[in-house]
Amino acid sequence: MGEIVSYSVVDGVAVVTIDNPPVNAMDRGVRAGLQKTFSDLKGRSDVKAIVLGCAGRTFVAGADIKEFDTGIAPPGFHEVLRLVEDSACPVVAAVHGTALGAGTELALSCHYRVADKTARFGLPELSLGIIPGAGGTQRLPRVVTLAHALDMILSGKPVAAPAARDMGLVDAIIDGDLMTGAVAFARNLVAKGAGPRRTREQPAKGAENADSLLEEKRKQVAKTMRNRQSPLALLDALKAAARLPFDEGLKVESDLSAKLEQATESRALRHLFFAEREVRKIPSIPASVQPRPITHVGIVGAGTMGGGIAMSFANIGVPVTVLDAKQEFLDTGFGRMRGNYERSVTRGSLKPEQADQRMGLIKPTLDAAKLGEADLIIEAVFENMALKKDIFRTLDKVARPGAILGTNTSTLDIGEIGAVTSRPQDVVGLHFFSPAHVMPLLEIVQTDKTAPDVLATALDVAKNIRKVGVVAKNSYGFIGNRMMDPYAREAEHCLLEGATPEQVDGALQDFGMAMGILAVFDLAGVEVGPSTRRERRHLLPKDPGYYRCSDMLVEKGWFGQKTGRGYYRYDNPGHKRTPDAEAAEMFWEEGKRLGVARRNPDRREIQERCFFSMINEGALLLEEGVALRAGDIDVVYASGYGFPRYRGGPMFYADTIGLKVIHDRLLEFKRTLDPQYWTPAPLLAKLAADGSTFAQWDAGRQ
Ligand code: T1G
């Protein structure tokens, strides 16, 4: 590999190139290379201007996130960026790809910035639980207004080059070859005698209304970004940018950054960043295995799930054929998809012509033979084994050889489904989450017959449709729903013991869950759980209180939002969720009838019973090999179940509590609650005894 940072001087313009694949992360090597280069160039009187660009697919895409765990080795960011900014001749950043985090901060330390039109700039540090730590909070408000800087960093969303130019972050968009254009831009600066334009010497823009702007945001983030420190720290850093001289503001930023980097919030978010990339690595799939090309997809079932899945493929330009049994089902399904696209157009997230183009890619059919040219067919019909088997027998006849047959089942045995075909090796579970065109999680379920290249294809499909694909072994509930079972079981049992639904959900939301599980059941339909359990009643625990509350609601026809009553009432004008004293009373009476002790569990007990039982189930999944890594379980929960990302997922959270603490609490619940549910998983008991963690268990298996 060549030098990480190199330069050449042509007719007085030095072109500096960073080449640090895969994303030019500004690791120690890059920082040292920049330090050496700009020190060398400092002494060259023949150099009249400097252009700084990157090789490969993107300008610097950030600091090397791995370095936070080991500490930032010298030279540090401030030292290097100051050297760039102190250059006696103009420095022009030439930006392509995604200049994120330290990438944008490096560009800000240059005096001018040019970009190709597809380039994007961003400061996504809050998504890692930190704030820009290389001067971004101090330099950005000196180039764009404080309001723009605040929005850019708080949202973390990349800004496209044209918009960046409009706000003052980019001086010119380069058509044609970026470096050629950047050198021409630099020569023009020299020709017109434009010297360095040091960002730190500019006044903060729009600082006059800093107090009101930042105070209003403080109130907002306290609600929308609950339990998190980094957004509040950002407001403090921006206030320093508006009120203090640059160097003092930089000190404020550094002190805040140092604290955040070591805090649990950032360690949790960095854990998820890497875990979401680790999930693509499956040891049983040799690197030589190539995914099968997917150029045409078939969907069986035009319902909510089938339509959402069809949209996921149409959104990336893949044609889709949707089969259903009746024209009216197709009409309803296509109307729903069109409605989804129209809502995106109304929201401004999609242009009308894009919506038309995507809808145009989705074709209806009543004839299964039309699925014959599909490379991948996904069944998404009712959770009924007989129906699914019929469909797979038909697919076995019409699908072309080598086509992959996926099922969106969430509870049925995929091995049993595949067994009715002549090609079980081509059968795989593709468990989408509703709404399928929005939710990022895709559970990829392998049976013991699924071929490695089918798994590789499913992972490739997940990345292409911008979902997070997590591989699970074929077992009831796969990963997510299997761990939901004890979690919701405890939530319901607390109702029999005297808690109200709002107390239970309140405890779960205080923890950081997007929604309490009882409100989720009301949203999804309370009847879904009991009907799934009916299919498995011979396997259920011997416990009359087991999900007794949802059974009672179903007996009364209270299915939740769709019927106006469930755990809560929705029969008010705005269909808002309101407490239902009658339902609570009904649960308590039932608890008494069943002889359940009235414990009136408090917030802490509700949280511990729900989350520790979930974690214990996760440990069982790891032992059974249903989940490959604890990190995979964290990704499932952060991407598909509204688990707060700033806690890193259930298994990371368990490590922060300490496995021995959890283990001892499980034993206490075994003594005081229904003992059949509280036996610590052997893996959890072992790790607790060894003073170890799930993270160490993962690392030991790499
Ligand atoms: N650090 C270390 N490794 C990184 C990395 C980073 N910043 N970004 C990507 N990788 C690895 C990734 O793990 C994967 O590795 C490979 O590169 C390809 O990534 C001081 C403190 C740039 C949009 O948050 O958003 O700067 O799995 O699969 O889908 O203020 O990577 O192949 O071994 O994601 O094309 C701020 C994070 C850091 C950007 C490319 N920057 N990266 O997406 O590829 S904090 C970020 C991304 C910071 C300063 C602060 C994406 C991408 P492997 P990939 P991609």
Image (tube, rainbow, N blue to C red):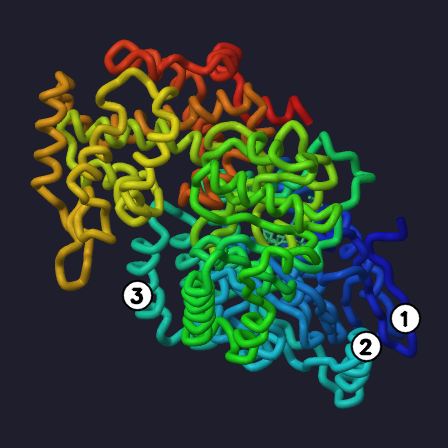
> Given this view, does label 2 or label 1 mark the residue nearer the observer?
2
- Contact between marks 2 and 1 (CB within 8 A): the answer is no
Q: Is residue 10 left or right of residue 149?
A: right
The structure residue drawn at horizontal position 56% and vertical position 35%, both measured from the top left corner, is 417
The residues bearing labels 1 and 3 have C-alpha atoms spaced at a distance of 50 Å
The kind of secondary structure element at disc 2 is loop
Q: Which mark is residue 662?
A: none
Counting from the top left corner in percent of width and height, residue 114 is at: 70, 76
Crowding at dot 2, Cα within 10 Å, few <14 / some 14-19 / many 20+, comes out as few
- Contact between marks 1 and 3 (CB within 8 A): the answer is no
Q: Nearer the viewer, residue 357 or 190?
A: 357
Q: Is mark 1 within 8 Å of ligand 1?
A: no
Q: Is residue 697 left or right of residue 293?
A: left
Q: Earlier in the sequence, mark 3 or mark 2?
A: 2
Residue tagged by mark 3? 216
Q: Is mark 2 within 8 Å of ligand 1?
A: no
Q: Earlier in the sequence, mark 2 or mark 1?
A: 1
Residue tagged by mark 2? 177
The residues bearing labels 2 and 1 have C-alpha atoms spaced at a distance of 18 Å
> Given this view, does label 3 or label 2 mark the residue nearer the observer?
2
The residues bearing labels 3 and 2 have C-alpha atoms spaced at a distance of 44 Å
Location of the C terminus by quadrant is top right
Counting from the top left corner in percent of width and height, residue 14 is at: 85, 70
Q: Amino acid at mark 1?
A: Val
Counting from the top left corner in percent of width and height, residue 288 is at: 82, 39
Q: Nearer the viewer, residue 326 or 231?
A: 326
The kind of secondary structure element at disc 3 is helix
The kind of secondary structure element at disc 1 is strand
